[in-house]
Amino acid sequence: MNDELNPLHDMLRRATAAGDDLPADLDAETAGLREGWLALGKLLDDAESAAGPAPESWKLSPPAAPRRWRVWVGVALAASLLIAVGATVASRMLNSANDRQVGPQSLAHENSANSSAKQPEAQPQSPAPQVVANSDTLNWSDSLDDEISIVAQAAVTVRYDSDLNLHGLSAVERDMDQLETEMNSGKL
Amino acid sequence: MEPTGRKTGESERLTAWVRDHGRAVRGYLLAMLRRPELADDLAQEVFYRAWRGRDGYREQGHARAYLLRIADRVVCDRVGRKRQEATLGDDVWEVPEPAGGNADPAANAAGAEAIHRLDAALAQLTPTRKRVLLLRYYGQLSFQEIADAIGCPLSTSLSHCHRGLQALRQQLAEENKQ
């Protein structure tokens, strides 16, 4: 504490000490402050008495502990919901992956074999196998033009695959339509 | 068994707080607000807050100081709802005391006189000086604890106390002259 504050601190500590006595050894200023302090105490006590006693019972009962079972039920519901969503997404992803592996190309191939007489469709000729092979040979030392060319060919391949998939799907749809038509016409 | 024992211990501590310091807390609130029913309500809030914050309280024999600091904060919150603390004026802090409910007219008159004299004395004090003196009176807080409670340096709390006591002394001298 600052040395300048020490005398003031001591004086105020003595002037405001607990109790209602006025020690004789106080200096004049401290005694004056002490008188003011005691007068304040008397006023506070009188006013407190005039205000009446404190209520005999205050509502101090602590609040009930929160019901934790509600929390646990909420957590369980959230977890089950999460699991259900995850399972649904995983199932859809698996189905989608299976469709890609099995479907389009083989279906397209079968379709073209079965219905080539009716609707010959020109299959786009693609340099895809060559492109894939070329992309494997891409090196850091290749020139920029070569790299651009390879990337462009790879894009064409991706587009070709996409068209092929669409073609396969449309072939399946056509077969289904044809089947439905034959069933309706009584041929089957 | 331990949680039950702990709960019992906490209940006993709360009971002891009310028994030993309830009067001081209520007195502080009463002096600050001058409305007995409001002081009673806020005293309950003080003990409720103390109960909620019991985990952060360490028993070091300063329970009254702890409760008085909460009481001071409760008063500031109460007053702050009407006006920001930075612009507090005496008109916000001093709420006129309604007439006492005592059936004895003489007791009512004496009570009204006591409250009037207290009002006159506290009117000499700024809100901060009032807080300093009342925290010292009811809580016997050290001046450093008071400084921490009201958010000022120790020198400022000492100055507030000194000037407040001087004002009270002057008020007393004027009353004696009359």
Image (tube, coloured by chain):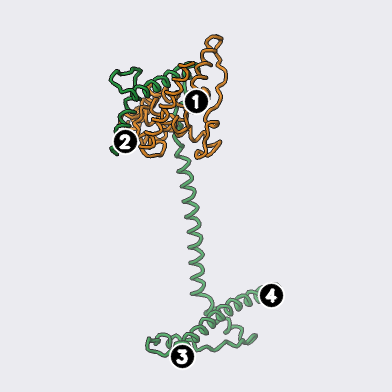
Is residue A134 placed above or below A38 in the rendered structure?
Answer: below
* CB within 8 Å, label 2 to label 3: no
Q: Nearer the viewer, residue A102 or A147?
A: A147
Disc 1: which residue: B39
Q: Numbered disc 4: what chain?
A: A
Q: Is residue A102 left or right of residue A19?
A: right
Disc 2: which residue: A5
Q: Numbered disc 2: what chain?
A: A
Kindly report which numbered mark, 2 or 1, lies closer to the viewer in this rendering.
2
Q: Numbered disc 3: what chain?
A: A
- Which tint was used for chain B? orange
Q: Are marks 2 and 4 on the same chain?
A: yes
Query: Counting residues from the N terminus, which is met first, the one under dot 2 or under dot 3?
Result: 2
Kindly report which numbered mark, 3 or 4, lies closer to the viewer in this rendering.
3
Give amino acid for label 4: Thr
x and y percent of residue B16 in the render? 37, 23
Q: Residue at x 60, y 88 (%)?
A: A122
Helix, strand or loop at label 2? It is helix
User: Quadrant where the N terminus of chain B lies?
Assistant: top left
Task: Identify by letter the chain in green.
Answer: A
Give amino acid for label 1: Ala
* CB within 8 Å, label 3 to label 4: no
Instruction: Locate residue B143: give its quadrant.
Output: top left
Q: Nearer the viewer, residue B10 or B47?
A: B47
Circle number at residue A181: 4
Helix, strand or loop at label 1? It is helix
Helix, strand or loop at label 4? It is helix
Disc 3: which residue: A145
Q: Residue at x 54, y 83 (%)?
A: A160
What's the distance in space between the residues labelled 2 and 3, CA to CA?
85 Å
Q: Is residue B6 left or right of residue B123?
A: left
Q: Residue at x 40, y 89 (%)?
A: A142
